[in-house]
Image (cartoon, rainbow, N blue to C red):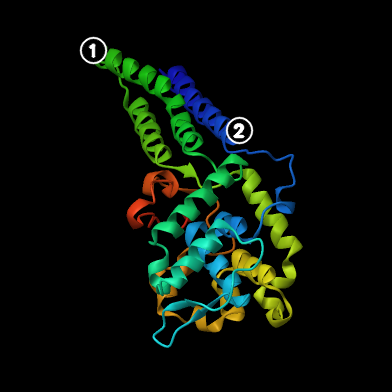
Amino acid sequence: MTSFIALYLALGVVAIGSTALARHWISRGPLSEAHHERIGPQEAAYLNGGPKLAMFAALGGLRRAGAIGTRPDGSLAQASPLPIGSTPLDNALYDAAGMHRRVRDLIGHAWVARALVELRRGLESTGLLPSTRRRRLYRLAALLVLPVLVVGAVHISRAHDAGRPFAWVVVISLALVYWLVWSLNRAPTSTRAGRRTLDELRSRHHHLEPLNSPSYRTYDASAAAMGIALFGKRSLSQVDPKLAADKGVSRIGLETAIGPIGAVGFGTASCGDYGSGSSSGGGGGCGGGGGGS
């Protein structure tokens, strides 16, 4: 009996270890490439805080460039032509400003939501964000513990029929079941390549850290957008205090989408596995990337 308990416990540990190894490779991403040299502020913002932060990084950059202003009633307005090299998200926000949308309404605007979905898909294609398939594989890797639970169930049944004690096997089985249920609800919201890219971007743009008191008046729109992308609302307050003070920023919940590690890490399933659903008809209101847990 004691030898079986030791064997059963060892099998459980091996199954959990195998799951960890499989997940390590599933969430790895292309680590050999220097992605930080190719991605812009909006991609960095999506990596750091999901669609909300990406939208505010783009909006902050457009306002810094003078393309979007604010009307007396607080709604947005087109102030000057779009800068050269504008992205689909820039275009969507600019069009929304032309319709005099308010900040709080932008995240649900059909064109903005569609541009954010395209932005995410681009990050998935480069391996910086996990695709829905990889997130599913990550969860399913936890099923490696099922054969161990079957062994435990068979042993419990036989021990019960023979009148032998099996309490410790039940305890270990319950622990494995608890771990399985917990683990099936976890999935990465970024890849290791994505997290490394963010680290490299923060190192390269450390001068934009709010604690360093960057003089955003001397920086162009791209640098302003990168500051917001990497350091969130603290940088937004320095780049554009009026925008940061807008009630729409608090209503959308930008403060929940930023932080030292932003959205990278792990989270539970929501919004169709990271909000990659349809954006037609004004949809796409999925929140920022899941926070670490």
| Structural distance between the alpha carbons of marks 1 and 2 | 43 Å
Q: For the view shown, which residue lies furthest in the front direction?
A: 81
Q: Callout 2, which amino acid?
A: Trp
Q: Residue at x 44, y 73 (%)?
A: 249
Q: Residue at x 76, y 62 (%)?
A: 204
Residue placed under numbered mark 2 in the picture: 25
Dot 2: element: helix
Dot 1: element: helix
> Looking at this view, is 156 or 184 the one in front?
184
Q: Residue at x 39, y 51 (%)?
A: 279
Between disc 1 and disc 2, the foreground one is 2
Q: Say above or below: 284 vs 9.
A: below
Q: Is residue 85 visible?
A: yes
Q: Residue at x 51, y 39 (%)?
A: 131
Residue 101 figure quarter: bottom left
Q: Quadrant of the N terminus?
A: top left
Which mark, residue 161? Answer: 1
Q: Callout 1, which amino acid?
A: Asp
Residue 170 figure quarter: top left
Which mark, residue 242? Answer: none
